[in-house]
Amino acid sequence: MIDPSDDPVADGETAGRSRDFVQSLERGLAIIRVFDAEHPSMTVSEIAQTTGLTRAATRRFLLTLTELGYVDGKNNRFELTPRVLELGYSYLSALSFPDIALPRLEKLVAETAEASEGSILDRGDIVYVVRVPGPALMTISVNVGARRPAHATAMGRVMLADLPPLAIEEYLRRNELTPILPRTITDPAQFRQELKKIRDQGYALVNQELEEGLVAVAVPVRDRMGRARAAINLSTHVGRKSVGDMHDLVPLVQQAAADIELGLSHSTNWAD
């Protein structure tokens, strides 16, 4: 267990971090991130076990977050409050991408009768920033703000494929290609080849590597410098559309991306 009495700056030094690193802030954010769709409400003991903090430290962090309005506690259980949305709202608002992408994804869903999402790349994950569900029920549960490992998703791969070779090697060094399903690519050499293929053809298709039955195609959304700053996809169940069907829908997804790029072309935050 982590000793909560340690000085936060000293902790940063002993962990090989910068002298200015404040570990108390890291721990507080770790507690916020421990809540998810499967764990919307947790006890002090459950949070302590998940984060590796002591119960005493966990309780103090929770009481502080409660006083700040980010956590609410009832009947010995804690849950996040809507105020945590403020932590990411400024970034998403400045990005402009979700607002511009939403109406175009709605049109894409109407054209294809399948779900569509938009995401950005954050270290080893994609973060969903906009989503339009399709008319058919999907087994996968995805909400705005959710994270998925980039290596197993079509959107993650189109953004990774755009990175310079050294950045791709750094990604592989820092992130394990976890075998989520038997089909998931876990061999680095094969993954490099897959990224090259994606780079050459301009889109990615992932067939049941993230969830059984889920097939998705994705294309990058580029800024005025040609950099892939985000990605959009079209996802379905293989029982509704085959892999070949999804290949055929790629031009529609590419046109949607082009429309979004046009809409973002005058955004100063998108051009820097």
Image (tube, helix red, strand yellow):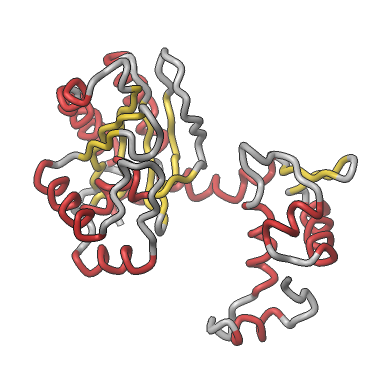
Q: Which residue is drawn at 40% across and 34% down?
A: 211
Q: Which quadrant, please, contains the N terminus? A: bottom right
Q: Nearer the viewer, residue 183 or 265?
A: 183
Q: Which quadrant, please, contains the C terminus? A: bottom left
Q: From what the image shows, is residue 96 above or below residue 25?
A: above
Residue 32 screen position, x and y as percent: 67, 53
Q: From what the image shows, is residue 173 above or below residue 256?
A: below
Question: Quadrant of the rendered structure where residue 260 is?
Answer: top left
Residue 259 screen position, x and y as percent: 23, 31
Q: Which residue is drawn at 23% across and 21% down?
A: 242
Q: Which of 111 and 236 is in front in this view?
A: 236
Q: Please state if 158 lies on the left or on the right of 24 as rendered.
A: left
Residue 136 screen position, x and y as percent: 42, 14
Question: Quadrant of the rendered structure where residue 187 is?
Answer: bottom left
Q: Please state if 94 lies on the left or on the right of 43 as rendered.
A: left
Q: Please state if 87 lies on the left or on the right of 53 as rendered.
A: left
The residue sitting at the left extreme is 200
Q: Which of 257 and 40 is in front in this view?
A: 40
Residue 171 screen position, x and y as percent: 32, 63
The residue sitting at the right extreme is 75
Q: Which residue is drawn at 9% across and 47% down?
A: 200
Question: Quadrant of the rendered structure where residue 73 is?
Answer: top right
